[in-house]
């Protein structure tokens, strides 16, 4: 590689490293998307609020709900009063959820909802509607509570918030708890700008309980909780009954992570989920044993043949055919005496009276059996001719002794 090519490659590598480093050290852009989950620390998450609930409600058990409110409220103990809190940029409940929430409030419980809209079923039942005045510029919005104890406090919202407010309510069952002041119109229009004050926080009596509805959910987000709006939140929550249990809904959230896979329905149903897991497990077991059965056959390797045994059998057959019993007995006696010498360390060159006793003591055999064997050996050594029966008797006695 020439010098010019090395320089080009070096410059390319340096530029590439610089790009990677700049991407790593560059601060991530701020995420302004609405989330309102208890774990999100982005501006419109609810991490700060959720972690302050213990301070705002010191006598309540805070329960984080990560399932549909229908599942929770349908199985609740109706004798225990509680509060339920939903905060999101929009709350859209289906008919079953809406009916369950209405029954929950009618039984004497309290629901706090901070949302820009409240769903068709709930809005129709409570006779309310919301809207906002569209503006091009991002003007400041002011919120205040109607209670005289909070009257002097006006809270300002300057960024990423719109003037969502209630346009109609059921005057018989509704109490205005807070208002929103905003500017409607633009400079280039004939009518110019107009200051509007509309309700954004109401109490709706329903059955034996109450709904507290706030159309400015941004006020409860991290961004405004950390920008001098915490007092507004604390004052708004002061209307809630001091019940033992407070449910924080972390399910109806824009920032909740959804499973996009088609398997979502299957995994959300306990029966289908277990059927799926069992089917996968059975399939893996089948594949494992199927593969194990269909492995290549391992060839059988025959052990090496012991030719010495065959040789001994051949020699024995030859001796037996020639009926040379004396020679066979002589060889068998030599092998046995060698066995006694090497195993029990007994001198067999001369067999005496003490040989049988010494052999019996070292071998663990009885003196009588050992003496019969030694006497039979001495007898055979003294004979010049031997019969087949002599050979058979010798073999039996030696075999019995070696057991």
Image (spheres, rainbow, N blue to C red):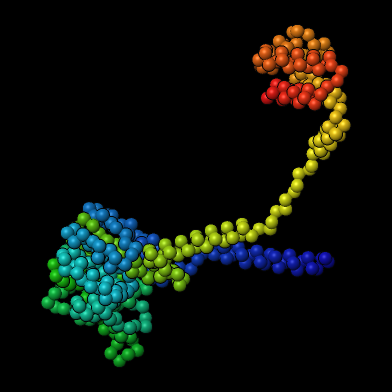
Instruction: Please give left or right for residue 238 compared with residue 277 in the image.
Output: left
Viewer-closest of 293 and 376 = 376
Residue extending farthest to the bottom is 190
Viewer-closest of 81 and 198 = 81
Residue plotted at (22% across, 80% down) = 124
Residue plotted at (76% across, 18% down) = 340
Q: Position of residue 206 (x, y in %)?
A: 16, 71
From the image, which quarter does the N terminus lie in? bottom right
Q: Position of residue 132 (x, y in %)?
A: 29, 81
Q: Position of residue 204 (x, y in %)?
A: 17, 72
Q: Dividing the picture into quarters, in which one does residue 97 lie? A: bottom left
Q: How many marks?
A: 0
Q: Dividing the picture into quarters, in which one does residue 117 lie? A: bottom left
Instruction: Please give left or right for residue 32 compared with residue 78 in the image.
Output: right
Residue extending farthest to the left is 172
As drawn, 364 above or below 235: above
Q: Position of residue 342 (x, y in %)?
A: 78, 19
Q: Specify whether residue 276 is in view.
A: yes
From the image, which quarter does the C terminus lie in? top right
């Amino acid at each position: 590689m020439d010098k010019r090519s090395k320089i080009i490659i070096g410059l390319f590598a340096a530029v590439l490293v610089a790009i990677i480093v700049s991407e790593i050290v560059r601060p991530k852009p701020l995420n302004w998307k609405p989330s309102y989950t208890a774990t999100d620390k982005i501006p419109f998450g609810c991490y700060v609020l959720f972690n302050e609930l213990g301070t705002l409600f010191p006598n309540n058990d805070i329960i984080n709900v990560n399932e549909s409110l229908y599942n929770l409220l349908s199985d609740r103990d109706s004798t225990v009063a509680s509060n339920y809190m939903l905060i999101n940029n929009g709350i859209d409940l289906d008919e079953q959820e809406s009916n369950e929430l209405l029954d929950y409030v009618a039984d004497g419980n309290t629901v706090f909802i901070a949302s820009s809209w409240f769903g068709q079923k709930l809005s129709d039942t409570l006779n309310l509607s919301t809207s906002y005045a569209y503006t091009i510029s991002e003007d400041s919005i002011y919120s205040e509570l109607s209670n005289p104890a909070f009257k002097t406090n006006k809270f300002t919202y300057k960024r990423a918030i719109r003037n969502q407010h209630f346009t109609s309510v059921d005057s018989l069952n509704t109490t205005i708890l807070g208002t929103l002041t905003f500017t409607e119109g633009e400079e280039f229009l004939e009518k110019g700008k107009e200051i509007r004050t509309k309700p954004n926080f109401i109490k709706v009596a329903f059955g034996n309980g109450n709904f507290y509805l706030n159309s400015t959910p941004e006020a409860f987000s991290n961004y405004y909780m950390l920008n001098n709006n915490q007092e507004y939140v604390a004052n708004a929550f002061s209307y809630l009954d001091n019940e033992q249990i407070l449910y924080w809904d972390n399910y109806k959230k824009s920032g909740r992570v959804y499973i996009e896979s088609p398997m979502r329905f299957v995994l959300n149903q306990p029966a289908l989920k277990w059927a799926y897991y069992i089917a996968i497990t059975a399939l893996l077991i089948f594949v494992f044993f199927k593969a194990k059965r269909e492995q290549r056959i391992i060839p059988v390797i025959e052990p090496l043949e012991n030719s010495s045994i065959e040789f001994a059998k051949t020699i024995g057959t030859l001796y037996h055919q020639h009926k040379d019993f004396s020679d066979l007995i002589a060889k068998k006696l030599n092998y046995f005496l060698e066995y006694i010498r090497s195993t029990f360390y007994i001198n067999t060159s001369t067999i005496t009276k003490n040989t049988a006793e010494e052999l019996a003591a070292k071998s663990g055999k009885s003196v009588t059996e050992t003496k019969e064997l030694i006497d039979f050996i001495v007898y055979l050594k003294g004979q010049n001719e031997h019969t087949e029966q002599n050979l058979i008797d010798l073999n039996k006695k030696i075999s019995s002794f070696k057991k």
